[in-house]
């Protein structure tokens, strides 16, 4: 799956939570949204992107959200 | 002529009051006593006793008029002979409906009418009934002693006979000869439809019914709803189908398969042939009204283009081969199994349809989850109302509109956002117009000047004509006014909403950056108008919000739905009759397909697949283990197809190649798949990329239910055998069996029983109860055995309502010097969605191509004249349409519909989408428009492809 497409989607989600002052809460909300609505292959693709590149194009708390997902996946493996 | 089996009580029922009960009155009619609500006419009271008083100018859908003088009665203690239609009952009244004198008076009236009316043989020529001849027969009047000569200076022998007929409307004829000038048609057009297209022109003998300014019906303002045809007591206005096919033998109640209003109809049948569709007066959504689509445009069901044989092919460039059902099903099942074995369990999926029944939709998602073993199921609501589900679920707790349609009759201020009901939801529009004529106020929020902004006897108080894509900015500025000017309903909020979320939200909207003045530069709407409109809504006793796809189909679609819910909560406008948040659903079963668990992340009743307890109930009922991870949504399926991880798709009753945005992208994805199964009435656009075709069944050919925009479940009843041999759900059952997951339903009622057993909001629903009640609004369960017209009474389904901060985030789709205009899309009355149905009816006389609406200023600078071919280019693609120069659109904005596939409107739309649901941003595309003199490259390829990919080789040996 095209990573640009997924990054754009993740950043769109992030934009909705941009107003949240507590960035931890924002990251948790973004993580939760992606966890609940993205099919596993989409999640593993964006996690792989994060692991490989550090997720430079993920804006603001979106990166922290994907980082959480990456850590959870690593813990499960 | 009204429905075959309808007994006309003559005048409307007394409306139920908002509060308390109406006083009951008892009277005696011909010696029988009857008790009726105060305000009831004598005529209606008599009808309740089975006594039909003769009448001509009265019918129960219209206010009593009192012009024909046929319904005279005698009242004890009163002089004269009052008309029973206009006289209301009074306690203790003693009424006589028959006497020698009354017989004489009625006889005279009838003879006068008959003197200028075609004979029974000419008029009622076996095909139709004429109330005048029925009345005359009942009264024993057979011929007229009158000649009109000498009356009022009328020349000898002069009559209205042999005047010309108006046959311009494709569906009905106006024959002036048979017209008795009772004005029932005129009043139907005014009172029922609200179009005011008809008048009585001239006076005395010269008076006649006239459409607009003495135009033909087709050229007039008439929208062909048919209300006048049904109201006409004679054969003056008659359906052409009745004239050509004869009289119906039986009437079967069913639900319209077009828009989300979900009108109830009686299909009047002669054997398996539909003679006509008559809206059902007892229908709770439509109360006996209909529109041109539902009433007249059913001819597609028997159109020659219907594909009635299953077909397969191994490559999409091969011609189709007609095969038996067994062969088609076994082929599809073998392909799906092969693909799953090779590419994994998650490499296949399905799409359910908002045009199919609840039962069919439920089965397809069950097939995906239980037989495919994954959650890759989605529905076309993805591309229209998915933000509604998400937004309303999170704020108030249920993914559905809060009211019933009738609630609008108690609204004081109606806020209409991004919806065009006169085109998209015509019968509800008629009801809304009725309320507006009674004095309710109207705020229209729309980039375009829709009809309701100004239409006969209605003018919107405010039209906030915003720039496309700035909904949230405008809504925040309205909320700003509500909160900062003290119009919020504090008590309600404290009582019913989460305090913390309110605090946060009110601080957010109060910020001066959200004021109308600050937002004016973004929205283009004058701050004064925003303030005034906000005050109007905020101070209304009952404020009701209605919205459509102009809200949802944006990158901030979900944010906007939340903003709407925020506003309704802040003003206390939820939880009673007359208020609410009401999404107007596009297609007939959008609500139903969502309810039935068509989304990849949730089971029926909107419960997430990761919920172990919920999943366990499905696992035990279905006898398989189910996946706890969400599946792919439609746009994700396309992406996955392009990367090779998604290879097979079963599409029931949808046409994603036409309806989904960025056509080039969609067709590339479809082409990349190894097995696409399309189940449809016609070889639609998506079928050009399919390997298996299952012939679909129309709504006339199957049993089931649809759920309309007000959560109303209505029965669809089979009136003819499926042309392809199977109802759609039967094909799904056989597909599932071939895949090795057994299904054994023999009737859709069994599927509904399973839905009821598995879905808390449906536990009380059964076909038996639907037959008894006519229709049911879910939730229907122990707490609400007869259903729930108004939701969130006392408290929100969620418990406490939750406010969400809704920051305005501009869309990525920006105008530039290369793409300086914004394209937005919409609907028109006579066509429906992708047009597959309506394009195959006579409705094309009103709309036979999609046009590009462009403001005179923008047209002028580009040298574009009305009717010119223009190229429309966006970042995604390019197409060509003819221009319509109009100031309905604002400068900088162009608009089109997408009813014709060759228009390629979606070649231009982009794959930007809503952040929460991936609902595409159809409503905003940056484009350039230039004058051209040939079709676009895409259109040329389109025609080649149509030629190549739709060939059928009809030589197969076929057994079903
Ligand atoms: S068909 Fe409908 S709109 Fe047309 S004249 Fe009759 S009532 Fe009016
Ligand atoms: S299309 Fe809609 S308004 Fe028209 S008859 Fe059907 S359900 Fe009613
Ligand atoms: S029916 Fe009462 S006056 Fe015509």
Image (cartoon, coloured by chain):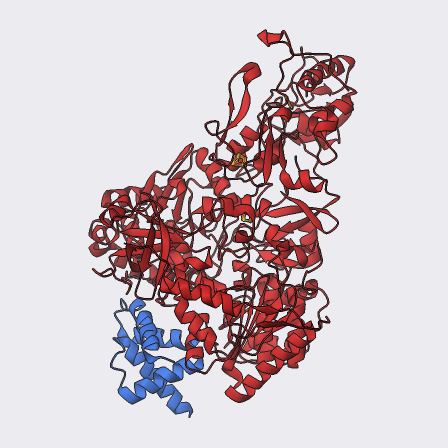
Q: Furthest-bottom residue in view? A: A77
**Residue B803 seen from this side:** no
Instruction: Classify the position of the N terminus of chain B by image quarter.
Output: top right
Identified at 42% across, 39% down, the residue is B412
Q: Is residue B57 left or right of residue B676?
A: right
Q: Position of residue B87 (x, y in %)?
A: 62, 21
The chain coloured blue is A
Q: Considering only vertical position in the picture, is B344 above or below B232? A: below
- Is residue B140 rendered to the left or right of residue B333? right
* Residue B882 place in picture, x, y as percent: 37, 51
Which residue does the image show at 44% across and 74% down from the upper left? B669
Q: Is residue B477 left or right of residue B605?
A: left
Please tell me whether residue A74 is drawn above or below residue B507 in the rendered image.
Answer: below
Quadrant housing residue B439: top left
What colour has chain B? Answer: red
Name the one closer to the observer, B821 or B320.
B320
Relative depth, front residue between B234 and B169: B169
In this rendered view, identify the residue nearer to me: B776 or A5. A5
Q: Is residue B295 above or below residue B87?
A: below
Q: Residue at x 60, y 21 (%)?
A: B66
Q: Position of residue B346 (x, y in %)?
A: 51, 82
Work out whether residue B91 can be spotted. yes
* Quadrant assignment, res B64: top right
* The C terminus of chain B - image quarter: bottom right
Residue B23 image point, x, y percent: 61, 31
Residue occupying the point 48% across, 63% down: B381
Q: Is residue B538 left or right of residue B102?
A: left
Q: How many numbered markers are drawn?
A: 0
Q: Quadrant of residue B911?
A: bottom left
């Amino acid at each position: 799956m095209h990573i640009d497409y997924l990054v754009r989607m993740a950043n769109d989600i992030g934009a909705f939570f941009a107003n949240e002052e507590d960035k931890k809460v924002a990251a948790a909300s973004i993580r939760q949204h992606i966890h609940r609505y993205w099919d596993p292959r989409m999640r593993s693709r964006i996690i792989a992107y994060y692991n490989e590149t550090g997720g430079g194009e993920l804006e603001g708390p979106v990166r922290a959200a994907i980082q959480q997902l990456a850590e959870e996946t690593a813990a499960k493996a | 002529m009204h429905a075959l089996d309808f007994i006309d009580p003559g005048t409307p029922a007394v409306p139920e009051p908002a509060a308390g009960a109406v006083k009951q009155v008892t009277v005696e009619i011909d010696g029988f006593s009857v008790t009726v609500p105060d305000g009831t006419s004598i005529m209606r009271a008599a009808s309740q006793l089975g006594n039909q008083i003769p009448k001509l100018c009265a019918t129960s859908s219209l206010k009593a008029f009192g012009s024909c003088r046929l319904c005279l009665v005698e009242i004890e203690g009163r002089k004269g002979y009052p008309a029973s239609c206009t006289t209301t009952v009074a306690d203790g009244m003693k009424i006589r409906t028959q006497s020698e004198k009354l017989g004489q008076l009625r006889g005279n009236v009838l003879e006068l009418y008959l003197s200028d009316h075609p004979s029974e043989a000419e008029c009622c020529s076996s095909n139709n009934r004429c109330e005048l001849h029925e009345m005359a027969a009942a009264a024993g009047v057979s011929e007229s002693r009158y000649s009109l000569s000498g009356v009022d200076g009328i020349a000898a022998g002069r009559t209205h006979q042999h005047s010309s007929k108006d046959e311009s409307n494709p569906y009905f004829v106006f024959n002036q000869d048979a017209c008795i000038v009772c004005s029932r048609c005129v009043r139907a057009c005014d009172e029922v439809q609200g179009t005011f297209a008809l008048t009585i022109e001239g006076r005395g003998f010269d008076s006649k019914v006239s459409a607009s300014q003495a135009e033909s019906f087709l050229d007039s303002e008439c929208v062909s709803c048919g209300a006048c045809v049904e109201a006409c007591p004679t054969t003056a206005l008659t359906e052409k189908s009745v004239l050509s096919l004869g009289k119906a033998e039986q009437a079967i109640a069913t639900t319209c398969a077009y828009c989300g209003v979900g009108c109830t109809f009686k299909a009047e049948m002669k054997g398996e042939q539909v003679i006509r569709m008559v809206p059902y007066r007892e229908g709770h959504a439509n109360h006996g009204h209909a529109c041109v689509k539902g009433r007249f445009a059913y001819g597609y069901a028997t159109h020659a283009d219907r594909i009635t044989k299953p077909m397969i092919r191994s490559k999409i460039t091969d011609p189709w081969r007609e095969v038996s059902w067994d062969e088609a099903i076994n082929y599809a099942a073998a392909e799906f199994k092969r693909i799953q074995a090779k590419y994994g369990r998650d490499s296949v999926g399905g799409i359910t349809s908002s045009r199919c029944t609840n039962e069919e939709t439920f089965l397809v998602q069950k097939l995906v989850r239980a037989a495919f073993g994954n959650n890759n199921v989605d529905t076309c609501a993805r591309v229209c109302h998915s933000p509604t589900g998400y937004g309303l679920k999170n704020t108030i707790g249920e993914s559905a509109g809060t009211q019933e349609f009738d609630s609008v009759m108690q609204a004081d201020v109606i806020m209409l956002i991004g919806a065009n009901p006169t085109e998209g939801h015509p019968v509800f529009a008629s009801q809304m117009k009725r309320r507006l004529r009674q004095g309710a106020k109207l705020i229209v929020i729309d980039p375009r000047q829709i009809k309701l902004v100004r239409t006969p006897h209605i003018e919107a108080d405010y039209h906030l004509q915003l720039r496309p894509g700035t909904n949230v900015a405008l809504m925040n500025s309205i909320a700003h006014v509500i909160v900062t000017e003290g119009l919020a309903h504090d008590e309600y909020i404290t009582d019913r909403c989460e305090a913390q979320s309110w605090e946060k939200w009110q601080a957010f909207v109060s910020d001066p950056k959200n004021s109308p003045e600050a937002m004016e530069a973004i929205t283009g709407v004058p701050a004064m108008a925003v303030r005034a409109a906000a005050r109007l809504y905020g101070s209304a006793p009952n404020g009701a919000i209605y919205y459509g796809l102009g809200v949802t189909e944006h990158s901030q679609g979900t944010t906007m739905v939340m903003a709407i819910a925020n506003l309704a909560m802040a003003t206390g406008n939820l939880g009673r009759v007359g208020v609410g948040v009401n999404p107007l659903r596009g297609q007939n079963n959008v609500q139903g397909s969502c309810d039935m668990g068509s989304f990849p992340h949730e089971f029926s009743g909107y419960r997430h697949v990761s919920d172990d307890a919920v999943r366990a109930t499905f696992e035990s009922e279905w006898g398989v283990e189910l996946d706890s991870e969400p599946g792919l949504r439609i746009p994700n399926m396309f992406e996955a197809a392009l990367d090779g991880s998604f290879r097979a798709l079963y599409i029931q009753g949808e046409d994603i190649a036409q309806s989904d945005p960025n056509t080039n992208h969609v067709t590339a994805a479809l082409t990349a798949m190894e097995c696409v199964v399309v189940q449809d009435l016609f070889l639609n656009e998506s079928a050009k990329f399919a390997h298996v075709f299952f012939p679909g069944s129309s709504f006339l050919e199957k049993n089931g239910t649809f759920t309309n925009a007000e959560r109303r479940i209505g029965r669809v009843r089979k009136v003819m055998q499926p042309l392809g041999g199977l109802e759609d759900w039967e094909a799904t059952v056989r597909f599932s069996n071939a895949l090795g997951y057994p299904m054994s339903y023999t009737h859709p009622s069994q599927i509904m029983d399973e839905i009821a057993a598995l879905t808390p909001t449906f536990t009380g629903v059964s076909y038996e109860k639907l037959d008894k009640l006519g229709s049911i609004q879910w939730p229907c369960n122990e707490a609400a055995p007869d259903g729930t017209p108004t939701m969130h009474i006392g408290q929100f389904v969620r418990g406490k309502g939750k406010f969400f901060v809704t920051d305005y985030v501009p869309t990525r789709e920006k105008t530039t010097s290369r793409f300086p205009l914004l394209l937005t899309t919409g609907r028109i009355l006579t066509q429906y969605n992708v047009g597959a149905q309506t394009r195959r009816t006579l409705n094309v006389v009103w709309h036979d191509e999609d046009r590009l609406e462009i403001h005179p200023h923008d047209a002028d600078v580009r040298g574009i004249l009305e009717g010119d071919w223009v190229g429309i280019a966006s970042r995604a693609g390019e197409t060509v349409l003819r221009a319509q120069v109009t100031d309905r659109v604002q400068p900088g904005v162009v608009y089109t519909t997408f009813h014709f596939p060759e228009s390629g409107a979606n070649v231009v739309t982009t794959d930007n989408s809503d952040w929460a649901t991936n609902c595409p941003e159809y409503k905003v595309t940056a484009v350039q428009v230039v004058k051209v003199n040939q079709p676009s490259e895409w259109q040329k390829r389109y025609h080649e492809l149509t030629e190549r990919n739709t060939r059928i080789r009809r030589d197969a040996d076929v057994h079903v």
